[in-house]
Image (cartoon, rainbow, N blue to C red):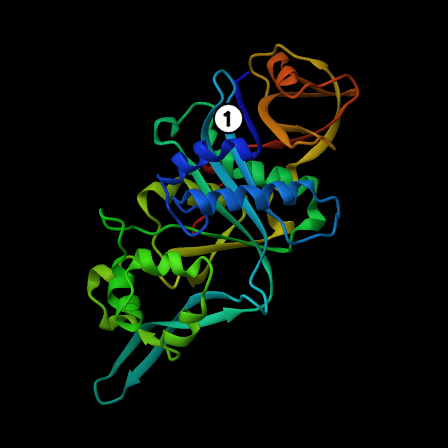
Amino acid sequence: MSGYLYREARPDDLDGVVRLAAHLDSLNLPADTAAIAAMIDASVSSFERNDPDDRTGRFLFVLERTSDGMLLGTSMIVASHGTTDDPHHAFRVDVEERYSESLGELFAHQTLTLVQSYRPHTELGALVLHPDFRGHPDRLGQGLSFVRFLFMALHPDRFHERVEAELLPPLEADGSSLLWEWLGRPFTRLSYRDADRLSRGNREFIRSLFPRTPIHTSLAPAEVQAVIGAVGAQTLGVARMLRAAGFRFNLHIDPFDGGPHFEAQRADILPLQQAHTRSFAGLTSAADAPKRLITRVGERPFRAALGAWVETADGALVDADTAIELGLQQGDLLLGLPLTSPRQHENPR
């Protein structure tokens, strides 16, 4: 139908993923060939493991245009983030109230407190779609996001109950962070990019050098206060999709740039609730058939496509292109997951 395939990353995807990483260059997807090669190797190993209870995986997905093999996007699941050996760090956003009897005024001061979490959670990350394909009618960005839920529905025991996503905040034109320049650099003497790169393998400096007492954000310039917990323009679509899927801002932000952390319990994630299995019962040519992300249960390597899905008493009918792309045969067990529309399920933050 669409000519696009969502699949697990392979070693020969290295050049394509490196090119995509240049559009993001984040902690989860650095624009560094050696780092991406290591990520792909770890992902291949994660997909190959057969232990259904293993929660150490790092799964990298790619979006391929099947007509020419061009990679258009990536997304990732880190099965376990935050351990006793490598805790999760964030600033907790609080409000401290003070009242002056002599002034007769109540003040509410926002504070940031560095926190560490040793309880593992599952993290969604490394979502990047080539800029030329944003707003595509086949909703490729949402497919990249939701293919992770499709895989989680296939292997629920490989992931934790708490799922979190860290969103990028507004950054400056040169890629720097206003929050980091005000808060991070004075305590570490590192640039935002240098701190980000260092933290990929060593986060000790965060615990050792960051303030351990609450920081009153009223001391910061107004432009710094404005980016705390804010979502960057290029990430607004991701935020809408996550809210529609059941995620909410958990009042934690990235300690480097102030980007918000969204969180949900796995049981409350709407796409996981809506995913279900049916046997492949044949083909449909209905132009108005609902669309689902579809994968064949038990298949290796993992592949999925957005295709027509019509349920009957005998199972699910799909369009011919999807059946060909996934190599379906009569009776194959399929897992289908709808792409929830943010406009239908939007809730306030």
In the image, residue 258 sits, relative to residue 78, either above or below, namely below
Residue 240 in view: no
Of 223 and 73, nearer the camera is 73
The residue at the far bottom in this view is: 102
The residue at the far front in this view is: 34
In the image, residue 304 sits, relative to residue 93, either above or below, namely above
Residue 174 percent coordinates (x, y): 23, 48
* Number of numbered discs on residues: 1
- Which residue occupies 62% across, 10% down? 285
Position of 27 with respect to 7 (left or right) is left
Position of 63 with respect to 271 (left or right) is left
In the image, residue 138 sits, relative to residue 195, either above or below, namely above
Of 114 and 277, nearer the camera is 114
Residue 88 percent coordinates (x, y): 51, 64
Say which quadrant the N terminus sits in: top right
Query: Toward which corner of the image does residue 326 lie, by quadrant?
Result: top right
Task: Identify the secondary structure beneath mark 1.
Answer: strand
Position of 168 with respect to 275 (left or right) is left
Residue 249 in view: yes
The residue at the far top in this view is: 285
Few, some or many C-alpha atoms within 10 Å of disc 1 (few <14, some 14-19, many ≥20)? many
Residue 81 percent coordinates (x, y): 56, 58
The type of residue carrying mark 1 is: Glu
Residue 268 percent coordinates (x, y): 61, 50
Of 222 and 117, nearer the camera is 117
Q: Find disc 1 in the rendering and name its residue.
A: 64
